Amino acid sequence: MGVTILLSYPVPENKTGPQTAELLIKRIGALGAVQSGQFLVDCETFSSGPTMGGPPRTVHVLHNSEQPAAVFALLESPGPPPKTVPLVADGLFDLLMLKMSSIYASKKQTRMEARGTRFEIADFLVKIGTVTMSSNFKGVLVEVEYRPCFIAGNCWELMREFMQSFLGSVVQNTPPPYFQVHNRLNDVYQPLDTIQQYLDHFASYRKVAGL
Amino acid sequence: MSTNSTSIAMEAPVEMQIQEIAFDGQETYAPSLSMSENLTKLAQKIDFAKCGPEEVNKEITEIDRNEDEAEQSTAPPLWPWDSVRNKLRNALTEVSVLSDLLTIAKGKKYVVLDPVPQDPPEPKPAMMMVWARKKSFAGAASVLFSGAERLKNSLIEAQKNRSTTADFHIELLRLRQNFRLKKVNNTIIGDLSYYRSSGSKHFHRGTFEVTKSEDEPDKLLSPPCSPNPNSANKLTSALRVTVPGELQGIASIKVYFQKDQDSLCSSNLNTPDTAFSIPEIDWQRKLEVAQNVLFCKEIFNQLAKEAVQLQSPIPHVVVGNQILASIFPGVQLVICLSHMEMSTDGKASLPPPIPRHDQVLEHTLHQLLRELHEKNAHYLLPHPASAPLGPSRKRSCAGPYAMDREEFVEMTESQTMLEQVIQQAQHTQLRDRTLCILDKLATQYKDPLISVHWLWLNSPTYACIKVTIFAQGYDEIYRNLVIIHVHDTYLKCISRDGKVVQLSYESMELKNYILCQICRHQIMAVQYLAKAMGWQCVANSFNLGSGTLVETFGNASSCILVSPVGDRLISIHCDQNSRVQVSVAQTPRKDFFPGQLVKERKWENLGNSFKEVQWEKMIGKNFLGKMELLMTSLTSSWMQ
């Protein structure tokens, strides 16, 4: 599992989302990338009912097609102090959540998906996907993974240069906000970090009014 | 009414006696006798003197007669108790006589009392019960004793007999500890097959029959009781075990290598001289041998199936009881099932002796089949226990460890038995070739010494070698190191400067590589030595090529050294056979003569002509030693 940076590509005014995705695909194709399948990251949110007592807590259950056997769950409890508990589990976790439907109710309308194609180019893995929330288009997400390295701080410069080559000035010169907290730049990168980046982006998309 | 009849008054006789009749005719009856008065009347009639039954009868008749008379007589007795008094008086007399007698007897002077022998008195009831109990205990004890005697006798007999024959049932018990038996219609059938009991998918009936041996107990043996191999086994068995015909004999898998042959297979005819008879063995070993036959057949079956299904560049050939698989072009792996069957006269024929049978690969085949059985039969208990049963541990952990797609693909790849055996065989061959080459080179080259160290951590498909090239006495100056990783079809060599070279299974490539390394070592070592002595290296070249020589292995390299002062030059050329040409030059030239073209004196500093040194005549143990001497002598020559 290499270091993965997730970027939200802003859709220009005169273009639609899928057109933007096409544009990026053309650019990455020009660099010599080889298409190798589709990818899907989806997120379902459950919130605790009144039977639990206390402020309502939310559980986000995410799946990533890159890790087909794993289910990621993040529990956010707002009660002081606000903390997020991450969990990586087997596929049986979905069934467990079904069983707990009386305690944790799922909000079907907030189900978010990032779906698109994945490209392999040398040591990089690029995924260009469109984010939809119950068939409403929300935005374009670009995920870039550098496979040989697993410490973000060591390869941030290399990745920035690569991303700027096909994304342009959208890429900032400083690492994304996710990596700037908790000394994450020098920590070993885990698949859970990718999922948390996805969750942050999904949360920001949810706040934006529907396109 | 008749006038002649008279009325007669009938009256009962008077019961009570009339005592008196009064004047007015009133009769006064005498009061009737009460009971006690009646008793006294009768008592006075009893004569106490004569008491006997006949006299009693007589008296009874007398009493009856007297009663009749008494009613007629009216004489009253004088005194009712008179006779009683008389009789009592008589009794008193007699009692007084008795008391006198007793008083005299007490004095013991005149009269002595002799005891009369009496019957023994009736025993008391408590004592009788104790004796009765004692008798019954004695009876029970005797019964138990007789039983114990019988048991002891039988035990002694059994001990005496144990040294010669064993009991059928005890033998059966021992047999049952090792093999599955069941009773079917009065016969005992055992099961030798691995099918379904240990995860084999190969169906074979493999049943054997167990019978009592009553007619020939001498021939059959029973397995020894102790595992000590020295104890002589003299027990004869009461069991006879009959194995099915196709499992009789001894089978094994023979694995060996052979060079490519034109004929696909060959067979040998055996002369009767080579026949021999298999000695009689006990039933345990007989069953084990039969089961081994079954196991070997299953291995061969599985390999044959895979050989037909696998796609390989040179297809595998299955002929009769042999499987030919080519591992390298020109080398074939032959796996053959050799089954020594018993012929009708009890003699078996030996198969042709197999050249260089590889026991390690045979063991590998056994292990692989057992692994296959294990995978089919045993499921790992997953953690947590509620997870689905069946996937391997790695697959169960794939979720929590968030494994990638590539890791999944890796997990699903698996190799068949034949592929694994071929891989191991290839590695064995490659390793042997590498060993040969390195040994040959080590014995051939004495100037830089080659030392080969094989790492002890290895696997059936991987080995690692460390080759050190150094000069004797100068190994501190410079040592060339090569690490060789031996895989199944290729070698990976890593040299000291970090270059990685992948060599194929051709052994000449390795020879070439090592020779190049030797050459390189010579020149590098000379450079380091020069540095230590103050000389400088002004030019070097490592890849001069081999030129037009016939041998195409190895490389030539050269270098030029200049002395500390700068007046001497040494040029060294080392070729692939480790032959060295050393030439020395001097600046300024001693033989400079200005000619037509070159006029000035200053040109004597250029154009060094090298003079070759007679290297064989140099003093020194090896190349570096000679170089050291040369450099020393040239350094100090400036003082002259």
Image (cartoon, coloured by chain):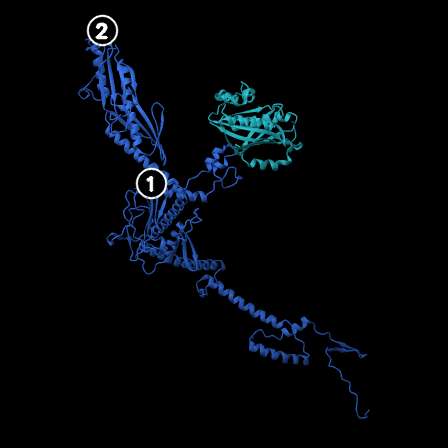
Chain colours: A cyan, B blue
Is B330 situated above or below B244? above
Q: Secondary structure at mark 2?
A: helix
Question: Mark on residue B601?
Answer: 2
Q: At which x and y percent is residue B614?
A: 18, 19
- Residue A75 makes an appearance in the image: no
- Residue B353 makes an appearance in the image: yes
- Going by the numbered disc 1, the residue's amino acid type is Val
Which is more toward the observer, B181 or B119?
A: B181
In the visual, does B388 lie left or right of B171? right
Q: Residues within 10 Å of mark 1 (few under 14, many from 20)?
A: some
Which is more toward the observer, B278 or B116?
A: B278
Identify the residue at horizontal 44%, vertical 42% (top origin). B375
Identify the residue at horizontal 49%, vertical 64% (top origin). B102
Q: At which x and y percent is residue A63?
A: 56, 32
- Going by the numbered disc 2, the residue's amino acid type is Arg
Q: Chain of mark 2?
A: B
- Nearer the observer: mark 2 or 1; the answer is 2
Q: Residues within 10 Å of mark 2 (few under 14, many from 20)?
A: few
Is B161 situated above or below B383? below
* Residue topped by disc 1: B360
Whole-angstrom CA distance, mark 2 to mark 1, is 78 Å
Q: At which x and y percent is residue B120?
A: 46, 64
Q: At which x and y percent is residue B538?
A: 29, 15
Specify whether disc 2 shares its chain with disc 1: yes
